[in-house]
Amino acid sequence: MRDTKYMRTALRLAQRGIGSVEPNPAVGAVIVKANQIIGRGWHKKFGDPHAEINAIEDCKTLGSNPQSAVMYVTLEPCSHQGKTAPCTEAIIAAGLTKVVVAALDPSEHASGKGIEQLRNAGIKVETGLCEKEAKLINAPFIKFAATGRCWTVLKWAQTIDGKMAQADNTQGHQWISNQLSRKDVHKLRQRVGAILVGINTVIADDPLLTARPDKGKKLIRVVLDSNLQIPLDCKLLATAKEAPLLIVASQQAHQANPQLVEEITQTGAEVLVCPDAQGQSNLPFVLDELSKRRIAQLLVEGGPTVISSFLKENLADEICVYISPKILGGSGSVDISGPMAQLTAGFSLHHVVLKPFGDDVRITGLTKGALSELGL
C-alpha cells in the first residue's frame, strides 16, 4: 500500500510534463527514506534533465542525503547518452539501494538495459508497480517505441445534435465549442508532432494549424488534398517557410498539374505523392510516411469525412470529442452523424475520461486497437 502511494505520487508528477517533453516520455520520480519523501522530480521540458536527475537534485536542495534511499520512477531509467547524461549513472552515484520501476521502456536503446545496469551495480530493482497507469500516461511514446508507428488522435467538436459547424459562419458564429475548450485543444496540439486535416477544412476555414502559445515547437501540418485543390493564397502556404507543410496528393493530380506543384513547392511546402485508393488519400501510406519522419503522435482535426475514414480503417488510437450543449437544428451544418452511420460496426471506448470546460464537456478514450498495442 505504501509503495503504491509513492508510485502514484510519481505518476502525478509525470503528468505535469505532458505537452512539454514530447517526443520524450513524461516521467516522474520520488525518493523515499525512512518512510518519508525526501525528493521529487519530473521531466519538465524536452532537452532538460530527466525526472530521476531532478529528484536527486531536489534532495540536495532540501538538505537530504539520498544515499541508501529508494527511488520510485514511472519508467525505466535511461542508460544511454542522449541530450542528457544517463540517469542510471546518477542513481548509482547517489548511492540509492533500491529502485521501483512502474513500466519498462521498449525503445531499442533501452529495453531492460537500464534495469540491467542498476542490478549490475548492486541496486535492487523491482518492476511492474502501477504498470497499467504508467503505460496509459505514456501510451503514444510506448506505441511508437515498440512498433515504430505513430499514435493517432481523432479530435472534433460537435453540438448535441451532431453538427460540427453553423450555417452562419460570420464572426462570432464560427465556433461550436467555447473558449475554454479551444484553449484545451492547443494544449493537445502541444503534445503532438503533426496535425492533419482534409482539403475541405482548408477551403472552408483557412486555418493556420499551429499550437498557441508558440513554445518553439513546429508541428508538421498535413493536408489530404488528392486533387490538389489547395488555394494558393491560403494561410498554410503563406506560412510554409515558418512551419513544415505536407500536401498529400494523388499520382494522377501530381502528373496532371506540374505547374501547380511547382507553385506549391516554391512556397516551401512539400507535395507527397501517394498511391490512389478509390479516389481518396491512402491513409495507411500517410501514417507510414509520418512514422518514417519520426512523428510519434498525430492529431487528426479533419471534418466528418476524414474522421470517419480513419475509423473505417481502424487507424485511430485515441478519440477526443468536445460536446457543446447546443441544438442547432436547421441552422447547423457539417453533420457528423451521416458519415458515422456508414461505419460497418459500432464500438466502445476504453479508459474514458470526461472533463467539463465551462458548459462544454470533453470526452476522451482509447480504442481497442490501442490497448492491444500497449499490451493492456
Image (cartoon, rainbow, N blue to C red):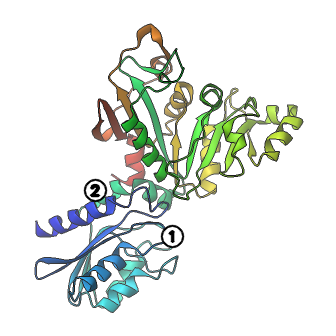
Between discs 2 and 1, the one toward the N terminus: 1
- Labelled pair 2, 1 in contact (Cβ < 8 Å): no
User: In the image, residue 119 lies at what x, y percent?
Assistant: 32, 85
Task: Identify which residue, 130 or 50, lies in the foreground.
Answer: 50
Task: Give the amino acid type for the residue marked by disc 1 in the picture.
Answer: Glu
User: In the image, residue 90 lies at what x, y percent?
Assistant: 37, 86
Q: Residue at x 52, y 24 (%)?
A: 171
User: In the image, residue 206 lies at what x, y percent?
Assistant: 63, 32
Task: Identify which residue, 272 or 123, lies in the foreground.
Answer: 272
Numbered badge on residue 108:
1
> Which residue bears the numbered disc 2?
133
User: In the image, residue 371 lies at what x, y percent?
Assistant: 37, 47
Q: How many residues crowd mark 2 within 10 Å: few (<14), some (14–19), many (20+)? A: some
Q: In terms of secondary structure, where does tag 1 sit?
A: loop
Task: Give the amino acid type for the residue marked by disc 2 in the picture.
Answer: Glu
Q: How far apart are labels 2 and 1 at the CA level?
A: 22 Å
Q: Is residue 8 above or below residue 332?
A: below
Q: In terms of secondary structure, where does tag 2 sit?
A: helix
Residue 73 seen by the camera: no
Q: Residue furthest front?
A: 171
Q: Residue at x 52, y 76 (%)?
A: 83
